[in-house]
Amino acid sequence: MLNTWRLQLLLQFETLGTMHRVGEVMYISTATVSQQLSILEKETDTILFEKVGRRVQLTHAGRNLAKQVRPVLNQLEQIEIALNDTSDIIQGTVRIASFSSALRSILIPVVSQLVKQFPQLQLRLTELEPDKSIPALDSHQFDLAVVAYFEKPQMLKQYDHSLVELGSDRLMVLVGEENPLVQQSAVRITELSEETWVMEPDGTYLSEYTQNLCSNAGFQPHVLNVFQSYSAIQTAVANNLAIGILPKLAVTEQEEGVQLLDLQPESTRHIYLVARKPQASNRSIQVVMEAIKAQASLVFADG
């Protein structure tokens, strides 16, 4: 019989892409990951990995085995959850990954409410970009993830996810009161080609998306200021140092001196609550999911 732990390492490798990352997630050495996956190759009498340049990747047979194994391990996880979920008490630890603006407006209020309502429930929040949250969820680092995408993401359907769309918001242009654009209620992306910008660092999802919008409009934004914090971005705009683009959810607490203009053409961001399907049957996780959906409905109703 195949060793389920080694099969889990295989799935982790498929999700994370390197043995080093698998070792980090599983709290074992890279050498141990390599050794155990070599044993799995011998157990299956199949070449599961191949070197391409300096990297190791799954062979066709390795990908096929991972595809066959994933639903089986999901079933085993569901059985384990059912066996352990015998108490009427909502308890245990639920780990949630979320992007910044949803953390502030949705997740933190939910945690504040639930820890009072269920004293034996522990909720752990981690701020994480959407493109990192789903692999982390699939590699069992988290139980839930709140993510946002401007296009319908195929990766959410790639594996066995329980998926709830919480709502949507759109990109807004932030300008200071001294900017001539403040007289307008909406602005086209092409009108921003001569502006000085403030953005998040390169590599973040929003920064990459905004720069692509500008590139598709025929220009590269002149980014003079780079900040991690949405509040710092607003402060720079309020002091007329730059213009910025943020999702509406990120500016629920609008700083004085900042005006929000609709961006044309409109860019809509869809926000999802994602769980692995086996985890979604856990009662503690169900309680957390319902609370997140309720809080999100309030947030997006106000928007």
Image (cartoon, rainbow, N blue to C red):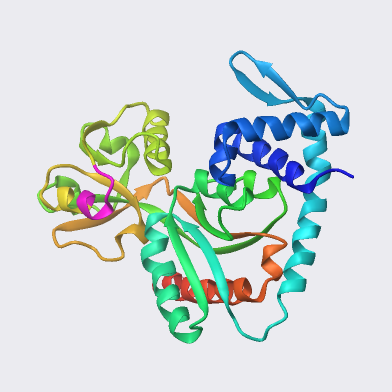
Quarter of the figure with residue 100: bottom left
Quarter of the figure with residue 154: top right
Name the spot of residue 93 as percent of width and height, x first.
Answer: 54, 69
In the picture provided, is 208 more to the left or to the right than 154? Answer: left
Front residue of this view, candidates 42 and 111? 42
Front residue of this view, candidates 19 and 176? 19
Residue 94 sits inside the magenta stretch? no
Residue 229 sits inside the magenta stretch? yes
Say above or below: 256 vs 135: below
Name the spot of residue 58 as percent of width and height, x first.
Answer: 72, 27
> Looking at this rendering, what residue extends furthest in the top direction?
53
Quarter of the figure with residue 101: bottom left
Q: In which quarter of the image is the C terminus?
A: bottom left
Q: Give the range drawn in magenta.
A: 227-233
Name the spot of residue 46 as percent of width and height, x first.
Answer: 85, 26
Any part of residue 159 in sight: yes
Q: In which quarter of the image is the N terminus?
A: top right
In the picture provided, is 190 more to the left or to the right than 133? Answer: left
What residue is at 58 percent from the left and 71 percent from the top? 289
Say above or below: 18 vs 257: above
What residue is at 54 percent from the left and 72 percent from the top? 293
What residue is at 63 percent from the left and 44 percent from the top? 155
In the picture provided, is 10 more to the left or to the right than 209? Answer: right
